[in-house]
Amino acid sequence: MTATVRDALRRAARKLNWAGVPDAGTDARFLLAFAMGRSVSMLTLDDDLRLGGTEETKFENAVELRLRRKPVSQIVGYRAFWKQEFAIDCNVLDPRPESEFLVEQAIGSDPIRILDLGTGSGCILLAILSECPGATGVGVDCSADALEIAFRNAGRLGLRDRAAFCLSNWFAEVKGKYDLIVSNPPYVSESEYSRLDPEIRDWEPEIALKAGESGLEAFREIAGSAREFLAPGGELHLEIGRGQERDVQRIFEYEGYSLCRRSKDLDQRVRVQAFRYGHAPE
């Protein structure tokens, strides 16, 4: 006889706890909901329900993957971000709540034409487009596998008519001018990378995380070329890492940009910086 929801969750949480997986109980509930095709809240209301044989096998396989520290989002195949759910896999970064500050600031600039550098799953570009019905955008990535995911997400959200995607190493294949350039670029240093949680270090694309010894190489790359693709009055919005505020500002000011805005995250750390090329408006 198969296990009840209650017993299955108890066993899985115990295994995950023993393996040192954080938030074991929460992860177990998400994985069981995935295996059974139900919502987490429905499982809570009916914990005497018995799993079917196929459901039990699917749950056990999902738990085994989590024991190997594969992120829950990659196991279930999606991640909630902004107001949507985005398909993801090991070829793209897991959308993180911190990046919603980048979306929030971008929406406030009321853009018409948007360029998203290092688009990955497309979550940032597509979230902005969903809030700006008059806008169009281009998502750029150097990974064809990542662009496949982004294209799929655009279709799921009904945004393929307003979102295009381009295989490019930063600006190499980009054409045109944009009111807004956004990017959550790689900003992890060599030393920081070795200390990342295994869910990130072992399962997410290294190329989307590491940015040289200092963690600042991607910012230098963007600063050197972005001016050529900004429309008059256009803005460049960047997500930055912990403690990088002054270094990133210096990089862009050296190239002739002015800081015009910044946003702090819930920990009161500067998470997003916005620049314009030339002098900031009075």
Image: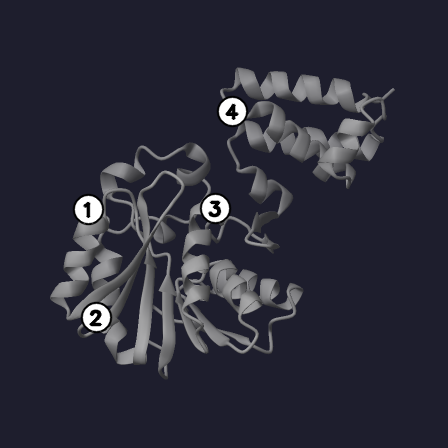
The residue sitting at 22% across, 53% down in the picture is: 216
- Image coordinates for residue 142, horizontal then vertical, percent: 39, 65
**Outermost residue toward the left?**
254
Front label number (2 vs 4): 2
Circle on res. 148: none
Q: Secondary structure at mark 3?
A: helix
Seen in the picture, residue 87 relative to 224 is either above or below; the reply is above
Q: Is residue 54 visible?
A: yes
Whether residue 212 sits left or right of residue 26 in the image: it is: left
Q: Which of 20/280 is in front?
A: 280
Which amino acid type is marked by label 3? Pro
The residue that label 3 is drawn on is 97
Q: Position of residue 4 (x, y in %)?
A: 81, 21
Residue at position x 55%, y 53% in the image? 82
Mark identifier at residue 21: 4
Q: Quadrant of residue 25?
A: top right
Asked if the residue at tag 4 contacts the one at tag 1, i.e. Cβ–Cβ closer than 8 Å, the answer is: no
Q: Residue at x 24, y 48 (%)?
A: 215
The quadrant the N terminus occupies is top right
For the residues marked 4 and 3, what is the alpha-carbon distance in whole angstroms?
A: 20 Å
Residue at the farthest front position: 282
- Neighbourhood count class around disc 3 (C-alpha, 10 Å): few under 14, some 14–19, many 20 upward: few
Could you tell which of marks 1 and 2 lies nearer the N-terminus?
1
Residue placed under numbered mark 2 in the picture: 280
Mark 1 touching mark 2, by CB under 8 A?
no
Q: Which residue is mark 1?
A: 213
